[in-house]
Image (cartoon, rainbow, N blue to C red):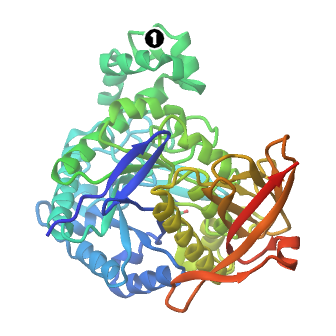
Amino acid sequence: MEREIPRLCRAGEDARLVVDGRPFVMLAGEMHNSSASDARTLDAAMDRATELGMNSVIAPVSWELVEPEEGVWDFSSVDTLLAAARRRGLRLGLLWFGAWKNAACSYAPEWVKRDLDRFRRAELEPGQRKAYLDFHGMTLPYATLSALCEETCDADAWAFARLMAHLREADAAERTVLFVQVENECGLLGAAREHSPEADDAFGRDVPSRLLGCLRGRAGELQGRLGAAWRAGAGRGSWEDVFGDFAEEAFTAWHTARYVEAVAAAGKVEYPLPLVVNCWLDKGREAGKFPTGGPVARVMEIWRCAAPSIDVVAPDIYVPDFCGTCDVYRSSGNPLVIEETAVHGRVASRAVWAVCHHHAPCFAPFGFEDMGEPFDDAAGVLFGASLDPAAVPQDAEEYARVMATLRELVARARDVRGGLEGMDAAISERPEADVLAVGSDGVVGIGVAYGDRPGACAVVPLGPDEALVLALHCHVTPVSLDPGRPHVDIISLDELVPDEGGVWSRGRRLNGDEATLLRFDGPALLRLRLFSYC
Ligand code: DGJ
């Protein structure tokens, strides 16, 4: 029997991932790029996800493995993934490594890579088909397929459609796969736009009326460089007339998004799962110095217009300003899906905050297999420490406890309140936002303070002055939010604890010293009742 297809459902400012008819939060990890290509490595990664308390895994499916020869299909890598996840009760997010993988074509099949005439490469300057990028002291080579090449787009779309049709057949009964990402960090490195004769020709034409209509309709909301360019431009005519010195970037975003839309739409017709695109952040750099045309915030309105089959733009967050990046990508109705973030010692507090403050339907550190390992080689420094010299490894056992606690908090919020509305959180990276309302009346709250370790605190209101509280490396103080009733007492503080089978129930009543100190390190799940008076 078929189960309901996973879907994204808008709820006010939020979006929920609805699985089996109920909101579901993917407490996931994204595995290293190569882990799914070998059954033993895959099993080890899946076991690690289970040890870390995750309920989902994000894993790649590459074009080169599913279509090794043109028109010859091999979905055994997908079936192996499905089986490995199901054996462990894990859900999956799949990543389609098609024409793009980090702005390069490393996962395109050999028959695509070799046929330079049929599957044209992006030309950074006329005839130049390879980019070399300075990346933190290394020189990295990039060969990229052209976003304007119809042959490539058709072949990519056909392969993606076959994948989605296979998933419909293989997964309709179980619904192990909850979403699929289309391409991976698409865009062009080394130039703001392609410079082949076809690209020059397209750049010389007028901006499509569809894009003009979309931007006109959203003119009030256009921000940053796109907004400034639009306001200064002619509103019609060539790319340069409309976008001035932002023209090349806007052009590349439009063509990249149109390509991805063709792939996404072909897959969605076969099996309409939620579809995601991820982005390598621009970090304020000029075009060409990040995968230009990818769905970064500054061109998101162009993507919305060109790629309506895409449900979510997910930022890959390795930068120190995690919270600010989340705020930006959650704006204007884009749900915050985090498929990739650094695995270092801030990751547990960030999971609590992203899920409970931003109601992220998915949170996943990248390369979770290595959690807790020292960053003692180039890969560790790049992926794990995320080039942050102050980064320390995350304690893996603590992460597993945080995942278990967060899962219980989310389950109770869903069961007691019927949804995740009202859930909120504070984080030590933003100590100024440190008061959380307890209870639905907004009369009492808790102030949250932190020590040296990354901390977070989440609250799920249960009644007028009662809440579930998840506390990680923080100190909480009951506070009044009502000047007419300035004093606050704790009526009761109970801990909730899991048994060996993972079933949670009430543990100790903590109304003594613990309720005076109110300092919690390893994650604690608490039921707190307050009383305010004058
Ligand atoms: C972002 C990519 O999307 C991932 O596949 C991986 O390459 C990471 N970067 C490594 O930091």
Where is residue 476? Give x, y as percent. 81, 63
User: Vertically, is 39 above or below 188?
Assistant: below
Where is residue 202? Give x, y as percent. 32, 24
- Image check: 384 left or right of 359? right
User: Vertically, is 284 above or below 457?
Assistant: above
Given the current orientation, which residue lies at the most extreme left position?
71
Report the number of discs: 1
The residue depicted at 81 percent of the width and 53 percent of the height is 532
Q: Quadrant of residue 124?
A: top left
Where is residue 296? Give x, y as percent. 51, 40
The residue depicted at 76 percent of the width and 48 percent of the height is 433
Nearer the observer, 184 or 52: 52
- Label 1 crowd (10 A; few <14 / some 14-19 / many >=20): some
Q: Is mark 1 within 8 Å of ligand 1?
A: no
Given the current orientation, which residue lies at the most extreme bottom position?
500
Given the current orientation, which residue lies at the most extreme front position?
534
* Residue 375 seen by the camera: no
User: Vertically, is 177 above or below 34?
Assistant: above
* Residue 95 seen by the camera: yes
- SS class, disc 1: helix
Quadrant of the image containing the N terminus: bottom left
Please give the residue where the numbered disc 1 appears in the rendered image.
241
- Image check: 396 left or right of 88? right
Tag 1: amino acid: Asp
Nearer the observer, 398 or 72: 398
Nearer the observer, 501 or 128: 501
Where is residue 264? Give x, y as percent. 27, 46
The residue depicted at 54 percent of the width and 33 percent of the height is 298
- Image check: 261 left or right of 138? left
Q: Quadrant of residue 208?
A: top left
